[in-house]
Structures are given as C-alpha cells and as structure tokens.
Amino acid sequence: MSQLSNRLNRLSPSATLAMSQKSGELKAQGIDVINLSVGEPDFNTPEHIKEAAKKAIDENYSRYSPVPGYPALRNAIVAKLKNENGLTYTAAQISCANGAKQSVCNVIMALVNEGDEVIVPAPYWVSYPEMVKMADGTPVIIAAGIEQNFKITPEQLEAAITSKTKALILCSPSNPTGSVYSKEELAGLATVLAKHPEVFVIADEIYEHINYIGKHESIAQFPEVHDRVIIVNGVSKAYAMTGWRIGFIAGPEWLVKGVNKLQGQYTSGPCSVSQKAAEAAYTGTQEPVKEMRAAFERRRDLIVKLAKEIPGFEVNTPQGAFYLFPKCDSFFGKSVGNTIIKNADDLAMYLLKEAHVACVGGTSFGAPECIRMSYATSDENIVEAIRRIKEALAKLK
C-alpha cells in the first residue's frame, strides 16, 4: 500500500524526462543514440553571460536575494517587456523563480482552488495538467489537431468556459507543436475572454525568441484582458540557459505579492549568481539570440523536408520553438516480430530500440496520435536520425 500523499499519487511522471533517462541508459551501454527527446538548446550559454556570472561570484553574490529576485534583474525584465513587447509593467509586478516551470506552478498554486477548472489546449506541455491537479483543480482539455495547426479557435474556447473556469493556459510558441498564435488569432481569443472577466490567462511565452514568422505577439497587449494576463517567460530557451534556472512572471501586483508569499515559504529567491547572469542576458547584446534562432530555422526547414519524405507521417510546418510533432497514427496496428504498435508511445519506444533515436510519444502531451521530435541538435544528427526512423518504420507491416 502506498504511503505517499493522494496529491502525489494523482500525478503522472514526466514522460520527456523518462525518455531522456531511457536513452541515457542505452548510451551508457555504448549504443549510439540520437536524442531528439530533450527540450533544450544544444548551444552553450553566450560568453558575456558567463562572464557576468564569474564577476558575480568574485563580487560575492553568494547570499539570499529578495524572494522575487534582485531589483536590478526585475528592472531589466521591465525594460525588456517595454522594448521588445510594448508592454508596461513595474518591478513590483515581476517575480523571478527557479525556471519558468516554477513560475507556471507558482501562478497555478496562487490562483486555483479545489474544483476550479483550468482550460488547457491540447497538445499541451506535459506538466500543465499535472500542475493543475496538484493545486486540486480540474484540467479541461480542448483538442486542436494538426488540421488546425494545433491551435484552438475562439468558438472552442467559448464552448469550454463554465461557471467554474478559473484560467486558460496558453503556450505560444508552443511546446510540443511549435505552433505560434498570430495577433489576429490572439485578438479572437481575447474577444471571448472579454465576456468572461473572471477568467485569467497564464501566457507561457518561454519560446518567444524562437519564432520564424517575425515579431512575437503576446495576448497581454489587448487592453480588455491585460489585467488578467500573467506572462511567464525566462532565459532558458532564448539564451541557452536551461541549467541556470531563471524564469519570471509579469502580472497584476496583487497576484505577484501572493506568488512571493508562496515562494517565500518553499524556495525563497532563485540562485543569486544565475540572477546576475540573467540580468546580463537581458541587458547585453542580443546577437547570440539571433544567431541561435537562424540555426533553429535552418534545422526546422531540414527536418520538415526530410520528415515529409517518410511514408505514413503527416507533417505540418511549425512556426516557432524547436519541435516537430508529426501525426503517425497510420502505423497503429502494424507490427514487426513480437512488437505491435498500439499508440504513439509504443512507436517512440520502438524507434528507440530499433533505430536508436529517442523521441517522445504524444500521449502525455494530450495527442496520442503524434510523436514529438526536438531538432535542437546538429544538422548531421537530424539527417541521420530521420534516415534511421524512415528505415525502422519501413519494417512495420
């Protein structure tokens, strides 16, 4: 009998981390595994950011910071939101955390009561529904398939809102699909939300700078919903700083105060040295961001072209992030030897064992008919991975 709390027993383990671990085990056995399962840039943190961290160590930034982060970092974020997004915030409306993941969870824990509904468009990032469950809320899933580029419509949103709806979680550019909502599409959602003043929007914009269609658009720009939008962002993806663990929220001051109260009880402020590095990321040159984005766009074009040549894959062209999310249900029911492919998770496991390529099945992203491939890896790895996948899939009959 499990002695773990009911809260914990309700949670599912992270599928992305589980697949990463399995591929690591095969690698440890000397097998050449190409890992397309990890949502992490393969670039190193830019030099000027690393230098700022070294300087912070020498200047003894080794003590507790204020819970929401140093004022200098929060002011740098205020300037970033103004200059890049045209949005006006004060430092009191910013709270920094140990990565955008904690930022999302902080907001959910600060807003959601038992029985509250939180709308989560699917495909979704694996942790959203689990975080809602952790807060004793109920995730309400809206399915948006490949035929609508994995984006929900205003009509779908309107139909999902009930008297229990507390929030909508919107991720653009999206993990796992790479879909990006245009200004017009966001305006359509904002029009619906304007009719429901009790519904908040958690806008996860962590992939903001990995965007191949020009300017990033935030739902916070619309005055009719601005005061109910909580932006979540951070340095992990744009600046190749996943391990530094700095994320932030920007939102109404009353909510930020609540998040600070919560964070003050269980982690306090994020790493002092990482904060100084993040400050340099926001205030220093943005050239490395542009270079990384250009590399990701080149790889996007490469993987889309190659994946479209795989018989049985249905592929759309993602407009941001660094994921491809092909529909692969044409392989369900097929088999080779004793292996039968029943769903995308089976397919991902088959590709790991047969092709030595790690992808993630779409079930835990709310899309059991798809698999997620990260193209945050070299061009050579992409070419070889898709070659292996194509070969392995051809064996299924």
Image (cartoon, helix red, strand yellow):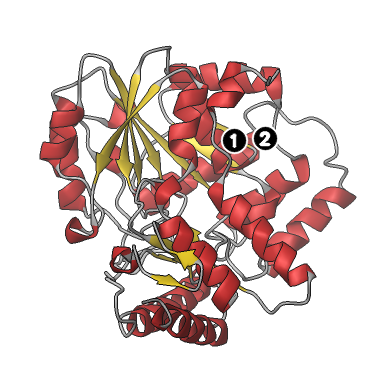
Mark 2 closeness class: few <14, some 14–19, many ≥20 residues within 10 Å: many
**Against 170, is 57 above or below?**
below
Which residue matches tag 1? 96
Residue 206, x across and y down, in percent: 47, 50
Which residue sits at x=42%, y=63%?
A: 341
The disc, 1 or 2, on the residue closer to the chain's N-terminal end is: 2
**What numbered label is drawn on residue 268?**
none
In-image side of 66 versus 294 (left or right): right
User: Please, what secondary structure does the residue beneath circle 2 have?
Assistant: loop
In-image side of 139 versus 264 (left or right): left
Q: CB of mark 1 within 8 Å of CB of mark 2?
A: no
**What numbered label is drawn on residue 70?**
2
Q: Which of marks 1 and 2 is in front?
A: 1
Q: Identity of the amino acid at label 1?
A: Cys
Which residue sits at x=59%, y=70%?
A: 353
Which residue sits at x=44%, y=62%?
A: 372
Front residue of 199/373: it is 373
CA distance for labels 1 and 2: 9 Å
Q: Identity of the amino acid at label 2?
A: Tyr
Q: Which quarter of the picture shows residue 3?
A: top right
Front residue of 278/377: it is 377
Residue 122, x across and y down, in percent: 31, 45
Residue 271, x across and y down, in percent: 74, 40
